[in-house]
Image (cartoon, rainbow, N blue to C red):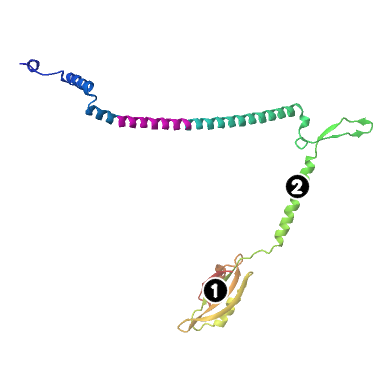
Amino acid sequence: MSGLQCLASENIWFDKHRYDEAETRFYEGANGPSTQSYQVKSALQPAKGRQQKRQHRNSSSHAGGDQELISRMKSLELENHSLHKVVEDMRAALQKLESRVGMLEKNPGAIPRAMAAPVQQVKVENGDEEDDDIDLFGSDEEDDAEAARIKQERVDAYAAKKAKKPVLIAKSSILLDVKPWDDETDMAKLEECVRSVQADGLLWGASKLVPVGYGIKKLQINCVVEDDKVGTDMLEEEITKFEDYVQSVDVAAFNKI
Protein backbone atom coordinates (compact mmCIF):
# COMPACT_ATOMS: atom_id res chain seq x y z
CA MET A 1 0.00 0.00 0.00
CA SER A 2 1.31 3.36 -1.03
CA GLY A 3 1.61 6.46 1.20
CA LEU A 4 -1.32 8.20 -0.47
CA GLN A 5 -3.54 5.17 0.04
CA CYS A 6 -2.54 5.08 3.72
CA LEU A 7 -3.42 8.76 4.15
CA ALA A 8 -6.74 8.19 2.39
CA SER A 9 -7.62 5.37 4.76
CA GLU A 10 -6.83 7.48 7.83
CA ASN A 11 -9.55 9.59 9.42
CA ILE A 12 -7.79 12.98 9.59
CA TRP A 13 -9.47 16.33 10.22
CA PHE A 14 -7.63 18.64 7.86
CA ASP A 15 -9.94 21.62 8.32
CA LYS A 16 -9.84 21.71 12.13
CA HIS A 17 -8.27 25.19 12.27
CA ARG A 18 -11.09 26.62 10.24
CA TYR A 19 -13.63 25.22 12.68
CA ASP A 20 -11.62 26.54 15.62
CA GLU A 21 -11.61 30.03 14.16
CA ALA A 22 -15.36 29.88 13.56
CA GLU A 23 -15.93 28.71 17.13
CA THR A 24 -13.81 31.54 18.49
CA ARG A 25 -15.70 34.13 16.51
CA PHE A 26 -18.99 32.65 17.78
CA TYR A 27 -18.08 32.88 21.41
CA GLU A 28 -16.67 36.36 20.95
CA GLY A 29 -19.94 37.45 19.43
CA ALA A 30 -21.92 35.87 22.25
CA ASN A 31 -19.82 36.72 25.33
CA GLY A 32 -17.51 39.58 24.14
CA PRO A 33 -13.80 39.23 23.37
CA SER A 34 -12.13 36.45 25.27
CA THR A 35 -9.29 37.01 27.75
CA GLN A 36 -6.82 35.42 25.36
CA SER A 37 -7.68 37.83 22.56
CA TYR A 38 -7.44 40.76 25.03
CA GLN A 39 -4.00 39.63 26.07
CA VAL A 40 -2.95 39.40 22.45
CA LYS A 41 -4.17 42.91 21.78
CA SER A 42 -2.46 44.27 24.92
CA ALA A 43 0.75 42.59 23.84
CA LEU A 44 0.46 44.07 20.37
CA GLN A 45 -0.12 47.61 21.60
CA PRO A 46 3.35 48.09 23.26
CA ALA A 47 4.98 46.62 20.18
CA LYS A 48 3.04 49.06 18.06
CA GLY A 49 4.12 51.94 20.39
CA ARG A 50 7.76 50.93 20.12
CA GLN A 51 7.42 50.78 16.37
CA GLN A 52 5.92 54.26 16.34
CA LYS A 53 8.75 55.62 18.55
CA ARG A 54 11.33 54.00 16.28
CA GLN A 55 9.67 55.55 13.27
CA HIS A 56 9.69 58.93 15.07
CA ARG A 57 13.43 58.63 15.82
CA ASN A 58 14.16 57.67 12.23
CA SER A 59 12.17 60.65 11.00
CA SER A 60 14.08 62.92 13.46
CA SER A 61 17.44 61.60 12.26
CA HIS A 62 16.35 62.11 8.66
CA ALA A 63 15.30 65.65 9.50
CA GLY A 64 18.69 66.36 11.16
CA GLY A 65 20.55 64.96 8.14
CA ASP A 66 18.47 67.13 5.83
CA GLN A 67 19.22 70.21 7.93
CA GLU A 68 22.97 69.51 7.82
CA LEU A 69 22.80 68.99 4.06
CA ILE A 70 20.99 72.31 3.65
CA SER A 71 23.59 74.16 5.72
CA ARG A 72 26.41 72.65 3.70
CA MET A 73 24.71 73.63 0.45
CA LYS A 74 24.36 77.21 1.72
CA SER A 75 28.06 77.37 2.65
CA LEU A 76 29.00 76.03 -0.79
CA GLU A 77 26.82 78.67 -2.43
CA LEU A 78 28.54 81.43 -0.42
CA GLU A 79 31.97 80.08 -1.32
CA ASN A 80 31.01 79.86 -4.98
CA HIS A 81 29.79 83.46 -4.87
CA SER A 82 33.10 84.67 -3.35
CA LEU A 83 35.07 82.75 -5.99
CA HIS A 84 33.04 84.37 -8.73
CA LYS A 85 33.84 87.77 -7.24
CA VAL A 86 37.59 87.02 -7.16
CA VAL A 87 37.49 85.87 -10.78
CA GLU A 88 35.70 89.05 -11.81
CA ASP A 89 38.30 91.20 -10.02
CA MET A 90 41.14 89.36 -11.74
CA ARG A 91 39.45 89.73 -15.09
CA ALA A 92 39.05 93.47 -14.55
CA ALA A 93 42.72 93.85 -13.54
CA LEU A 94 43.78 91.88 -16.64
CA GLN A 95 41.70 94.10 -18.87
CA LYS A 96 43.31 97.22 -17.38
CA LEU A 97 46.76 95.76 -17.94
CA GLU A 98 45.96 94.87 -21.54
CA SER A 99 44.67 98.40 -22.16
CA ARG A 100 47.87 99.93 -20.71
CA VAL A 101 50.06 97.67 -22.85
CA GLY A 102 48.07 98.63 -25.92
CA MET A 103 48.51 102.33 -25.15
CA LEU A 104 52.27 101.89 -24.75
CA GLU A 105 52.49 100.02 -28.04
CA LYS A 106 50.58 102.75 -29.85
CA ASN A 107 52.50 105.61 -28.20
CA PRO A 108 56.16 104.68 -27.55
CA GLY A 109 56.79 108.22 -26.26
CA ALA A 110 54.80 107.33 -23.17
CA ILE A 111 57.54 104.93 -22.06
CA PRO A 112 59.50 106.33 -19.09
CA ARG A 113 62.68 108.16 -20.05
CA ALA A 114 64.73 105.89 -17.87
CA MET A 115 63.74 102.94 -20.09
CA ALA A 116 64.50 104.67 -23.36
CA ALA A 117 68.02 105.15 -24.69
CA PRO A 118 69.03 108.80 -24.48
CA VAL A 119 69.50 110.42 -27.83
CA GLN A 120 71.55 113.55 -28.23
CA GLN A 121 71.26 115.71 -31.31
CA VAL A 122 74.39 117.63 -32.22
CA LYS A 123 74.48 120.31 -34.84
CA VAL A 124 77.94 120.71 -36.36
CA GLU A 125 78.93 123.63 -38.53
CA ASN A 126 82.02 123.36 -40.67
CA GLY A 127 82.70 126.69 -42.41
CA ASP A 128 79.87 127.59 -44.65
CA GLU A 129 78.61 124.01 -44.85
CA GLU A 130 76.01 122.92 -42.36
CA ASP A 131 75.80 119.19 -41.61
CA ASP A 132 72.60 117.43 -40.87
CA ASP A 133 71.59 116.63 -37.32
CA ILE A 134 73.47 113.63 -35.95
CA ASP A 135 71.94 111.29 -33.39
CA LEU A 136 74.41 110.10 -30.80
CA PHE A 137 73.41 107.43 -28.34
CA GLY A 138 74.15 109.00 -24.99
CA SER A 139 77.48 108.87 -23.23
CA ASP A 140 77.80 105.14 -22.47
CA GLU A 141 81.55 105.10 -23.03
CA GLU A 142 82.08 108.02 -20.66
CA ASP A 143 79.90 106.35 -18.03
CA ASP A 144 81.84 103.07 -18.39
CA ALA A 145 85.15 104.90 -18.05
CA GLU A 146 83.94 106.73 -14.94
CA ALA A 147 82.68 103.48 -13.38
CA ALA A 148 85.99 101.75 -14.16
CA ARG A 149 87.91 104.63 -12.59
CA ILE A 150 85.83 104.55 -9.41
CA LYS A 151 86.21 100.78 -9.18
CA GLN A 152 89.98 101.00 -9.59
CA GLU A 153 90.17 103.67 -6.89
CA ARG A 154 88.27 101.47 -4.48
CA VAL A 155 90.49 98.47 -5.23
CA ASP A 156 93.63 100.56 -4.68
CA ALA A 157 92.28 101.94 -1.41
CA TYR A 158 91.46 98.42 -0.19
CA ALA A 159 94.92 97.14 -1.14
CA ALA A 160 96.59 100.05 0.67
CA LYS A 161 94.49 99.47 3.77
CA LYS A 162 95.28 95.78 3.73
CA ALA A 163 99.01 96.47 3.32
CA LYS A 164 99.01 98.61 6.45
CA LYS A 165 97.76 95.75 8.60
CA PRO A 166 100.53 93.79 10.36
CA VAL A 167 101.09 90.37 8.85
CA LEU A 168 100.67 87.54 11.33
CA ILE A 169 103.87 85.48 11.44
CA ALA A 170 103.57 81.85 12.48
CA LYS A 171 106.21 80.90 15.05
CA SER A 172 107.11 77.76 16.99
CA SER A 173 109.05 76.98 20.14
CA ILE A 174 111.40 74.00 19.78
CA LEU A 175 113.28 72.17 22.57
CA LEU A 176 116.31 70.23 21.27
CA ASP A 177 118.29 67.44 22.93
CA VAL A 178 121.93 67.50 21.73
CA LYS A 179 123.86 64.40 22.81
CA PRO A 180 127.69 64.23 22.98
CA TRP A 181 129.91 61.21 22.20
CA ASP A 182 131.05 60.51 25.74
CA ASP A 183 131.65 62.04 29.16
CA GLU A 184 134.92 63.64 28.04
CA THR A 185 133.20 65.92 25.47
CA ASP A 186 133.54 69.63 26.26
CA MET A 187 129.89 70.62 26.75
CA ALA A 188 130.70 74.35 26.81
CA LYS A 189 132.30 74.03 23.40
CA LEU A 190 129.38 71.92 22.20
CA GLU A 191 126.89 74.63 23.24
CA GLU A 192 129.03 77.26 21.55
CA CYS A 193 128.93 75.26 18.33
CA VAL A 194 125.14 74.89 18.56
CA ARG A 195 124.60 78.60 19.13
CA SER A 196 126.87 79.40 16.21
CA VAL A 197 124.12 78.18 13.90
CA GLN A 198 122.42 81.39 12.77
CA ALA A 199 119.58 81.96 10.30
CA ASP A 200 116.87 84.48 9.53
CA GLY A 201 113.91 83.67 11.78
CA LEU A 202 115.98 81.72 14.37
CA LEU A 203 116.42 82.86 17.97
CA TRP A 204 118.25 80.74 20.58
CA GLY A 205 116.98 80.69 24.14
CA ALA A 206 117.89 79.15 27.49
CA SER A 207 119.82 75.91 27.84
CA LYS A 208 120.84 73.42 30.51
CA LEU A 209 122.75 70.18 30.95
CA VAL A 210 120.70 67.10 31.75
CA PRO A 211 122.38 63.90 33.08
CA VAL A 212 121.90 60.86 30.89
CA GLY A 213 123.95 58.19 32.67
CA TYR A 214 127.51 56.99 33.27
CA GLY A 215 128.61 60.60 33.81
CA ILE A 216 127.34 61.67 30.38
CA LYS A 217 125.22 64.80 30.09
CA LYS A 218 123.19 66.08 27.17
CA LEU A 219 122.58 69.68 26.17
CA GLN A 220 118.91 70.70 26.26
CA ILE A 221 118.48 74.01 24.48
CA ASN A 222 115.39 76.02 23.51
CA CYS A 223 114.88 78.12 20.38
CA VAL A 224 112.11 80.09 18.66
CA VAL A 225 111.76 79.86 14.88
CA GLU A 226 109.56 81.29 12.18
CA ASP A 227 107.79 78.40 10.49
CA ASP A 228 108.14 79.81 6.98
CA LYS A 229 111.92 80.30 7.32
CA VAL A 230 113.35 77.66 9.69
CA GLY A 231 112.47 74.01 10.16
CA THR A 232 113.59 71.17 12.44
CA ASP A 233 115.30 69.35 9.57
CA MET A 234 117.51 72.36 8.88
CA LEU A 235 118.47 72.67 12.57
CA GLU A 236 119.38 68.99 12.87
CA GLU A 237 121.41 69.10 9.68
CA GLU A 238 123.38 72.21 10.74
CA ILE A 239 124.06 71.01 14.31
CA THR A 240 125.21 67.50 13.31
CA LYS A 241 127.89 69.09 11.13
CA PHE A 242 129.97 69.47 14.32
CA GLU A 243 130.92 65.81 14.31
CA ASP A 244 133.68 66.18 16.88
CA TYR A 245 131.21 67.13 19.60
CA VAL A 246 127.71 66.10 18.51
CA GLN A 247 126.54 62.51 18.31
CA SER A 248 122.83 63.12 17.61
CA VAL A 249 120.06 65.73 17.80
CA ASP A 250 116.46 64.99 18.86
CA VAL A 251 113.36 67.18 19.11
CA ALA A 252 112.19 66.94 22.73
CA ALA A 253 109.24 69.34 22.37
CA PHE A 254 107.54 71.33 19.61
CA ASN A 255 104.87 73.95 20.37
CA LYS A 256 103.13 76.51 18.17
CA ILE A 257 103.21 80.09 19.45
Q: Is residue 45 above or below residue 256?
A: above
* Region in magenta: 45-67
Q: Is residue 135 left or right of residue 205?
A: right
Taking the image as shown, residue 43 lies to the left or right of residue 121, namely left
Say which amino acid is labelled 2: Ala
Q: Quadrant of the N terminus?
A: top left
x and y percentages locating residue 254 in the rendered image = 54, 70
Residue 44 among those drawn in magenta: no
For image coordinates 60% across by 72% down, the residue present is 224
- Disc 1 packing (10 Å; few <14; some 14–19; many ≥20): some
- Residue mark closest to the camera, 1 vs 2: 2
- Seen at 36% across and 32% down, the residue is 53
Q: Residue furthest left?
A: 1
**Between 106 and 202, which is closer to the camera in this rendering?**
106
- Where residue 116 sits, quadrant-wise, is top right
Q: Secondary structure at mark 1?
A: strand
Instruction: Give the residue number, with chain letter if any, for mark 1.
Output: 175
Residue, disc 2: 148
